[in-house]
Amino acid sequence: MREFHPEHPTLLGFWIYLMSDTLVFACLFACYGVLGRSYGGGPTGADVFDLPIVALNTALLLLSSITYGFAVLQIQRGARGGTLLWLALTGILGAAFVGIELREFAQLIAEGNGPQRSAFLSSFFTLVGTHGLHVSFGIVWLVTLMIQVVRHGLIPANKRRLLCLSMFWHFLDLVWIGVFTFVYLMGVLP
Amino acid sequence: MSATDPGALEPSAASETPGGDDHGVEGASPFHATLKDYLTGLSLAAILTAIPFWLVMSRVLGSPGATTALILAIAVVQIVVHVIYFLHMNTKSEGGWSFLALIFTLVLVVIALAGSLWVMYHLNRNVMPVSVEQMRNAP
C-alpha cells in the first residue's frame, strides 16, 4: 500500500539547495542589473546579441524541460525503456543548448568582445556562463543516472535521484526565463 | 513501451521498506505528475515566451519603458507557470516547508535585486559626476 507521506527529506533538502542556488543567481542578476549598461566604449547589447539564436536556445531548453517531464511520467509508470528514451532526448536537447551557447561565447571572444572588454560583458559572461555551467553539470548528472537506471533499473534510490534531477532541470529552465528577459531582450532595448 | 519492467519496481520497493527504513518511503513519488499538467505548462510557457520575443523583435510598442515593464511582468507570470506545472509546487508539498523556503527565498531575491539596483543607481547619479566617456573626451 502506498499512501501519501509528507516527509521526503531528500527532496525537501534538494529544494532548499535549489533555493540557495536561486540566491547565487539573484546576486549575479543584481550584478548584471548594475553593470549591464556600463559599456566602457565597447559594444552594447543591441550590437552583440543575436535574438533569433537566443529564441532557438530558449525553445531548446523549454523542450528539454518538457521531455524531462515525460520521463517523470514514465518513471511513475515504472517503464524503464520509456524513461531512458526521454532522458536521452533531454540530454541531447541540453547538449544542443550548451553547444549553441558556447558557439555564441566563442564568437564574442573572437570578435574581441570577451569578458575583459567591459563591465557589461564581464557581468554577461559571469551570469550566462554560470547558467551554462549548471546545464553542463546537469547533463553529466543525467548521463550518470541513465547508467544507473540501465544497471539497476528504477529502484527507489534511482527514482529519488531522478526526481531531484527533474527539479534541478526545471529550475534551470526557470532561471533561463530571467536570463532571456533581463539580459537578452532588455539588453537589446535602448 | 511496456508498462513495467519486472523485478525492478514494486518488489524491490516493498523489500526495502520493512525495518522502518525511511529510504523505502522516499522512493515513492512526492507528487503525481500528469500529462495534462505538462502539456498545460508547455502551452502556457510557449505563449509566454513567444510574446516577449515578438514584442522586442518587431518593436510592437513604441516606448522601450513600456516594453520593459510588460516583458518583466510576462517573465514573472511564466516563472509562476513553471513552478506550478513543472516543479509541481503548491502550498502543501512537504507539509508546507518547501513553500515556506520559496517565500523566504523570494523575499531575499527581491531585497538583493531591488536594493542593489536602487543603491547603485543613486551612487551613479550622485557620486560619479563624470562618465568614462566624458573623462576620455576631456581636454
Image (cartoon, coloured by chain):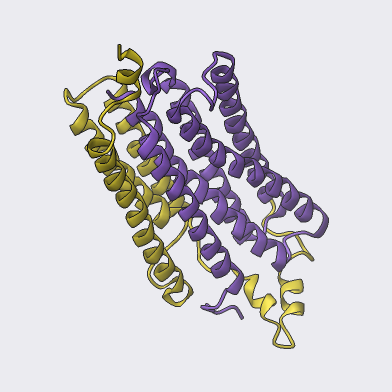
Chain colours: A purple, B yellow
Q: Reply above or below: A135 against A118.
A: below
In this orientation, which residue lies closer to the viewer: B104 or A141? B104
Which residue is drawn at the image coordinates 57% and 68% (left, top)? A13
Q: Reply above or below: A53 against B46.
A: above
Which residue is drawn at the image coordinates 65% and 35% (left, top)? A92
Q: Reply above or below: B32 against B18.
A: above
Which residue is drawn at the image coordinates 55% and 23% (left, top)? A114
**Residue B75 sits in which quadrant?**
top left
Q: Is residue B90 left or right of residue B23?
A: left
In this orientation, which residue lies closer to the viewer: B107 or B69? B107
Residue B41: x and y in percent read 40, 48
Residue A133: x and y in percent read 61, 40
Residue most extreme to the bottom? B19
Residue A174: x and y in percent read 45, 47
Quadrant, the C terminus of chain A: top left
Quadrant, the N terminus of chain A: bottom right
Q: Reply above or below: A160 against B35.
A: below
Residue most extreme to the right? A151
